[in-house]
Image (spheres, rainbow, N blue to C red):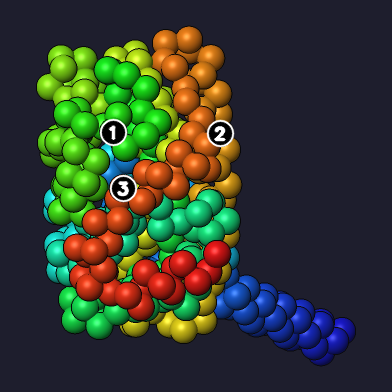
Amino acid sequence: MRKMLLISIISLFALIAAACSGGSSESTGGSEEKKPAAETKPIVIKFSHVTAIDSVKGKAADRFAELVAEKTDGKVKVEVYPSSQLYGDNDELDALVSGNVHMIAPSVTKMVKLDPRWQYVDMPFLFENQEHAHKFFESDVAKTLLNSDQLAANDIMGLAFWENGFKHFTNNKHPLQKPADFAGLKFRAQAGKVLEAQFNALGAGSATIAFGETYAALQQGTVDGQENTYNNIDTQKYQEVQKYMSLSQHGRLDYAIFVNKPFWAKMPEDIRAQVEEALKEATELEWKLATDENAASLENIKNSGKIEVLDLTDEERAALAEALQPVYDEFSKTITPELIDGIRGLK
């Protein structure tokens, strides 16, 4: 009996030891499975722009950030800084070159100091309609600007065009329907010699006034008129201080997306492709938003009852174009015949 009792006790200890050993093994295995993997920090793209969050550009930039997060599964994070939070109009290009930001979306005229061909956007009646402009944005002709040696020499690469729209004349004196109607008037204009030449050819004067100061300049009579897109005229409420608007469609205001080239080149190829796919979708959205909001703004302007809207005929636009031919005589070599003819050939 004693012998059998001793065997039973030994067997019991053996079973307890085996159970403890098995539990320890399972516990260790579970611990290894729950061990967190090393976290990888996302690539951060600092995207700076100067317009408000609820602007067409602001909405498209925010959607781009969302699409990048989705398509890269969080491997890339786009930090959008609107309303000149980081850099203003005059500083963002230098910030891009230095790598302090990685992406900007300026008005294309801001690139003139690096490549004078970007003044193409101010050449009068170069674009026939919106479809013509879109063809240019997607063309090989446009790529000669986006991928120019002048930009590359400054570590910049262009990726896409975002549109604002066609410009139209407003003034506070009388209807503008023929070249002679411009004589003696003074217009607010963006900086640029092409625009100076445009108004000179029409017998008018021009003054470079900041966008945010234009309403006051019109109200106080510092200038008689200005040129802008439907959406800018509407949102800036120029119809309150102007009496006439001519639907001239004589020039354009557009943006382009630029990135710091060394930063872009260091991004893994597969991830960069996903970011570029997100940008393509955001660009399509931006074009649609610009179209929709310009159309809505034109209706707002007409319905305001505060400004007379003049829809120019093809003959009246042709007469203005002929009067503005001296602008081409002066600047064709600067903009280059290749670019001008290339754009015209896309009609």
Q: Residues within 10 Å of mark 1 (few under 14, many from 20)?
A: few
Q: Secondary structure at mark 3?
A: helix
Residue visible at 18% across and 50% down? 197
In the rendered image, the quadrant that contains the C terminus is bottom right
Q: Amino acid at mark 1?
A: Ala
Q: Is 143 placed above or below 282 here?
A: below
Q: Residues within 10 Å of mark 3 (few under 14, many from 20)?
A: some
Alpha-carbon span between mark 1 and mark 2: 29 Å
> Which is more foreground, mark 1 or mark 2?
1
Q: Secondary structure at mark 1?
A: helix
Residues at marks 2 and 3 touching, judged by CB atoms closer than 8 Å: no
Residue 16 location (% of width, % of height):
71, 77
Q: Is residue 161 visible?
A: yes
* Residue 323, label in figure: 3
> Which is more foreground, mark 2 or mark 3?
3
Residue 21 location (% of width, % of height):
65, 82
Q: Is residue 10 left or right of residue 146?
A: right
Disc with the residue nearer the chain's start (1 vs 3)? 1
For disc 2, the marked residue is: 295
Q: Amino acid at mark 2?
A: Ala
For disc 1, the marked residue is: 180
